[in-house]
Amino acid sequence: MAARWPPLAGKTNTVGKASSQKQSRREMIEKMQREQSRSDRRRTILIVVCAIVAGLAIIAYPAIKLVQDSKTKNQALTDFGVAASAASCEAITNDEAGGTQDHRPDGEKILYSVSPPSSGPHYAVWAPFDKKFYTPSDRPPVENLVHNLEHGYTILWYRDTLPKDQIDQIEKISKSKLPDSSVGKFIAAPFKESEGKPWPDGKNLAFAHWSSPDASQKSFGHRQFCGSVSGDALKQFMEKYPAADAQEPNAG
């Protein structure tokens, strides 16, 4: 009878060890795949949530802006800025006016005798009558805006270096309830230091109006400098110089 050899223990252990390592690697790979899948799902959910939030913000902003503008439209000028007595306003200047219907070619740089201008030659086209507030990025040339003065507008010129919170107040003023005598003829626009003679120290905005009571009286441009934003001061200026008191009040 043939002899039986004992089992090869070392070989069996090696095979078992290799099988165990293979199983461990498979489990590790499967674990990594599961974690990667969870990470991908989280990333996808985050992207979707961010997209929804951004979409809602895009939709909500115009609606919020519309509500704010509607509220501002019903507010009086005096609701914005400081009282006239606290605005550090100077006395109104009366500048000899000229330049009625003196239309110059677009692009020609006009040097005005006062800064900001309250009358003078101007471009043939005026700034849109339905826009009441400008920033440094969208403001038309000064020469277009002077044409608006000829039609009875009051312009609030403000330094383009004013802090944003004060510019925001000016924008609200432009959308608020203006005096009836203005018939809506108002524009707020920035003025650069390089565009004219220096303003008085500490004065950050100026009201301007070009008046002509009647053909028998001399025409004047009126300016008033103030240190602080004041809807109250603006209201007093606009009531003193209504839109009808202009070179060509019936235009626009």
Image (cartoon, rainbow, N blue to C red):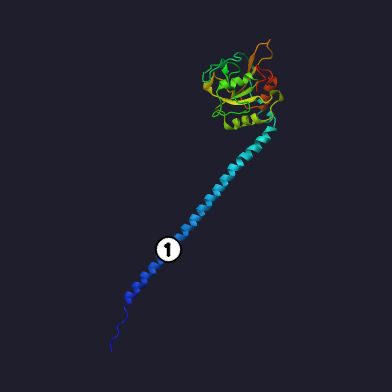
- Dot 1 falls on a residue whose secondary structure is helix
Q: Position of residue 138 (x, y in %)?
A: 55, 29
> Neighbour class for label 1 at 10 Å: few (<14), some, many (≥20)?
few
For the point 68% across and 32% down, the residue is 73
For the point 46% across and 57% down, the residue is 36
For the point 45% across and 60% down, the residue is 33
Quarter of the rendering containing residue 27: bottom left
For the point 44% across and 63% down, the residue is 30
Nearest to the observer: residue 209 or residue 206: 209
Q: Position of residue 40 (x, y in %)?
A: 48, 55
Quarter of the rendering containing residue 29: bottom left
Viewer can see residue 154:
yes
Nearest to the observer: residue 216 or residue 39: 216
Quarter of the rendering containing residue 162: top right
**Residue farthest to the right?**
180
Find disc 1 in the rendering and name its residue.
Answer: 28
Q: Does residue 56 appear to the left or right of 75 in the view shown?
A: left
**Residue farthest to the top?**
216
Q: Amino acid at mark 1?
A: Met
Q: Does residue 249 appear to the left or right of 164 in the view shown?
A: right
Query: The C terminus appears in which quarter of the rendering?
Result: top right
Vertical comparison of 203 with 56: above or below: above
Vertical comparison of 146 with 39: above or below: above
